[in-house]
């Protein structure tokens, strides 16, 4: 594996900080500010705090978890914006 891009990651509360600290590939992360399925504090923050190569930002304060995949998302721009950010991240780290 050469790079990772996570969107609305889950299981952050279940991972061991020591294992995350061993990740050495670039990791980009985007989360939904209004995500009640995988809330930032529980599921995303551990990745950002413990993976030394992780960076990320919110897709927006009103973006919900299902805005990334729902047929009729509340914020239809979120999926496109994050998709473009993922593509740019991969281009930067895989060229």
Image (tube, rainbow, N blue to C red):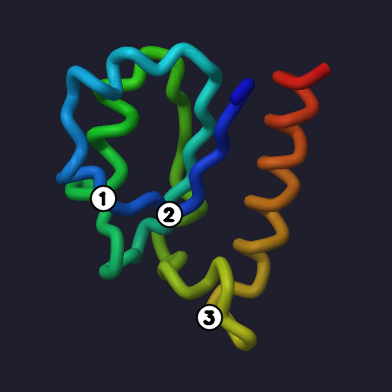
Outermost residue toward the front?
A: 1
Q: Which quarter of the picture shows residue 36?
A: bottom left
Q: Is residue 37 left or right of residue 28?
A: left
Q: Quadrant of the N terminus?
A: top right
Residue that mark 2 sits on: 8
Task: Identify the residue shown where x is 33% and y is 29%.
Answer: 48
SS type, badge 3: loop
Identify the residue shown where x is 42% and y is 68%.
Answer: 65
For the C terminus, which image quadrant? top right
Image-quadrant location for residue 69: bottom right
Which tag is nearer the camera, tag 3 or tag 1?
A: 1
- Which callout, 3 or 2, points to the residue nearer the camera? 2
User: Is 82 left, or right, of 16 in this rendering?
Assistant: right
Label 3, label 1: how many angstroms apart (C-alpha)? 24 Å
- Cα gap from disc 3 to disc 2, whole angstroms: 16 Å
Q: 1 above or below 30?
A: above
Q: Is tag 3's residue or tag 2's residue first in the polypeptide sequence? A: 2
Q: Position of residue 79 (x, y in %)?
A: 64, 63
- Residue visible at 37% across and 57% down? 33
- Look at the numbered disc 2 and give the secondary structure of its residue: loop
Relative image position of residue 56 (x, y in whole percent): 47, 33
- Near mark 2 (Cα within 10 A), the count class, few <14, some 14-19 or many ≥20, is many
Kindly identify which numbered label has been placed on residue 56: none
Q: Nearer the viewer, residue 74 or 19?
A: 19
**Would you name the residue on which mark 3 appears?**
74
Q: Position of residue 25 (x, y in %)?
A: 53, 17
Q: Is residue 34 above or below residue 19?
A: below
Q: Secondary structure at mark 1?
A: loop
Disc number placed over residue 11 in the picture, else none: 1
* Residue 46 on image: x %, y %: 23, 34
Vertically, is 18 above or below 56? above
């Amino acid at each position: 594996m050469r790079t990772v891009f996570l969107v609305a990651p889950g299981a952050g509360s279940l991972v061991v900080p020591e294992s995350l600290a061993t990740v050495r590939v670039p990791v980009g992360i985007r989360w939904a500010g209004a995500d009640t399925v995988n809330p930032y504090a529980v599921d995303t923050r551990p990745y950002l705090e413990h993976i030394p190569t992780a960076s990320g930002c919110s897709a927006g304060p009103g973006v919900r978890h299902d805005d990334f995949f729902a047929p009729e998302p509340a914020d239809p721009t979120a999926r496109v914006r994050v998709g473009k950010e993922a593509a740019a991240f991969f281009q930067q780290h895989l060229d």
